[in-house]
């Protein structure tokens, strides 16, 4: 073995040194380097495994704490007032049907003036679907209040999520004014 090979073997302790012929005076040094490398590798494995077990334990405690201390009832971000029809006197189902049909025709005519793809168009689409839902329930034979209640539930869907809350409240109030006696 040349000195270059020995220097290479000593410089890179990960190299397998057992099969390499090393002169007698370098045997002690090579053995020390090899055992030191194995010891450091053992310590590194222990450190990594300890670190992983500590992380696992920490995550377990955090999840257990969240489960134990989480409130039993979490309220939605929106209040339920938007989805509830008030207890007032409503017009009959036949009168409500004719009024809602007129409102739908009015909304359809507004579609021509609004730019397709704009926020105003999306809001108008929500308003149209709201009144369509009310009309469908009226045609199924539901009362005016039940139909309005079902229409108001449409505001909680993903389709109406892009519409501002103030617009939804305005649409609700318009429908109440349209359907009350």
Image (cartoon, helix red, strand yellow):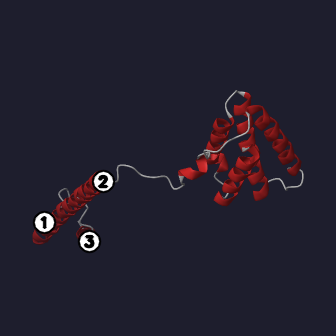
SS for callout 2: helix
Q: Earlier in the sequence, mark 2 or mark 1?
A: 1
> Could you classify mark 2 by the number of other residues whose Cα lies within 10 Å: few (under 14), some (14-19), or many (20 or more)?
few
Name above or below for residue 146 compared with residue 27. above
Residue ID at (26%, 71%): 11
Image quarter where the C terminus lies is top right
Name above or below for residue 63 compared with residue 87. below
Find residue 11 and name its label. 3
Query: Dividing the picture into quarters, in which one does residue 117 lie?
Result: bottom right
Q: Earlier in the sequence, mark 1 or mark 3?
A: 3
Query: Dividing the picture into quarters, in which one does residue 31 lie?
Result: bottom left
Foreground of the two, 28 or 13: 13
Foreground of the two, 83 or 51: 83
Residue ID at (57%, 52%): 81
- Give how far across and how far down residue 52 sits, in percent: 26, 57
Foreground of the two, 110 or 87: 87
Q: Which residue is mark 2?
A: 63
Find residue 31 and name its label. 1
CB within 8 Å, label 2 to label 1: no
- Give how far across and how far down residue 164 sits, in percent: 66, 58
Q: Is residue 69 left or right of residue 27?
A: right
Name above or below for residue 53 compared with residue 97. below
Residue ID at (20%, 59%): 50
């Amino acid at each position: 073995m040349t000195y270059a090979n020995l220097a290479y073997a000593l410089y890179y302790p990960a190299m397998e040194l057992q099969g390499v012929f090393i002169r007698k005076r370098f045997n002690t040094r090579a053995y020390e380097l090899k055992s030191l490398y194995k010891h450091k590798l053992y310590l590194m494995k222990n450190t990594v495994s300890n670190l992983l077990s500590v992380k696992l334990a920490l995550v377990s405690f955090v999840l257990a704490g969240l489960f134990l201390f989480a409130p039993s009832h979490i309220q939605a971000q929106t209040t339920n007032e938007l989805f509830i029809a008030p207890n007032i006197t409503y017009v009959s189902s036949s009168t409500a049907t004719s009024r809602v049909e007129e409102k739908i025709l009015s909304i359809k005519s507004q579609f021509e003036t609004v730019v397709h793809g704009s926020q105003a168009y999306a809001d108008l689409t929500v308003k149209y679907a709201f009144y369509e839902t009310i009309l469908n329930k009226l045609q199924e034979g539901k009362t005016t209040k039940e139909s309005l209640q079902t229409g108001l539930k449409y505001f909680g869907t993903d389709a109406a999520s892009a519409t501002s809350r103030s617009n939804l409240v305005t649409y609700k109030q318009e429908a109440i004014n349209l359907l009350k006696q």
